[in-house]
Image (tube, helix red, strand yellow):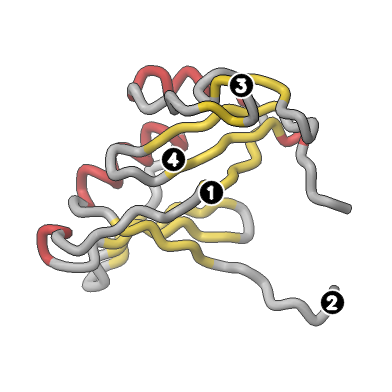
Amino acid sequence: MTNAPALFRLILQVPDLDQAAEFYAKLLADEGGRIPRALRHYFDCGAVILALVDPTPGGSCAKPIPDYIYFSVNDLEAVYLRASELGCLSTEDVHGYSAGQIAVRPWGERSFYVKDPWGNGLCFVDEHTLFTGR
């Protein structure tokens, strides 16, 4: 698919940009960077930028994404430890398995799921087990 467009930015709406930037900096082990005058905080995640945005002053209109964002990581246990310390491991089930525990999913990925304090779902996947459908 050489003519396919490239995804370069994904936006999460948050009601408190400073609090969200601090949370994601700890979870991703990266400080990211504030975008002056734009009320955004960016994290470089490979070819895609994760952007935190406060859509209105005070975030009164911030809406969580309806599904999960998937991250490929080279040290799943280290991310799991940070997520555990932040208290954001998912309490849901994924195909009969605890989403908040590291597990090999039926499609072969070794992963775990979290929910950020604003209801956005994230999944962290061991980069050696990625299922891309190819």
Amino acid found under the numbered disc labelled 2? Thr
Please name the residue shown 83% across and 51% down the image: 133
Label ID, residue 69: 1
Residue highlighted by disc 2? 2
Amino acid found under the numbered disc labelled 3? Tyr
Mark 3 or mark 4, earlier in chain = 4
Residue highlighted by disc 3? 97
Residue 65 in which image quadrant: bottom left
In the image, taking residue 76 as reference, residue 134 lies left or right, namely right
Measure the alpha-carbon separation of dots 2 and 1: 24 Å
Dot 4 crowding, Cα within 10 Å, few <14, some 14–19, many 20+: some
- The secondary structure type at the circle numbered 4 is loop
Measure the alpha-carbon separation of dots 1 and 3: 18 Å
Amino acid found under the numbered disc labelled 4? Asp
Amino acid found under the numbered disc labelled 1? Ile
Please name the residue shown 30% across and 62% down the image: 53
- The secondary structure type at the circle numbered 1 is strand
- The secondary structure type at the circle numbered 3 is strand
Measure the alpha-carbon separation of dots 2 and 4: 31 Å
Please name the residue shown 51% across and 54% down the image: 44
> Residue 35 appears at what percent x and percent y?
31, 65
For this rendering, which residue is in front, 10 or 118?
Answer: 118
In the image, taking residue 65 as reference, residue 44 lies left or right, namely right
Measure the alpha-carbon separation of dots 3 and 4: 29 Å
> Residue 66 appears at what percent x and percent y?
44, 54
Mark 2 or mark 3, earlier in chain = 2
Dot 3 crowding, Cα within 10 Å, few <14, some 14–19, many 20+: some
Residue highlighted by disc 4? 30
- Mark nearer the viewer, 2 or 3: 3
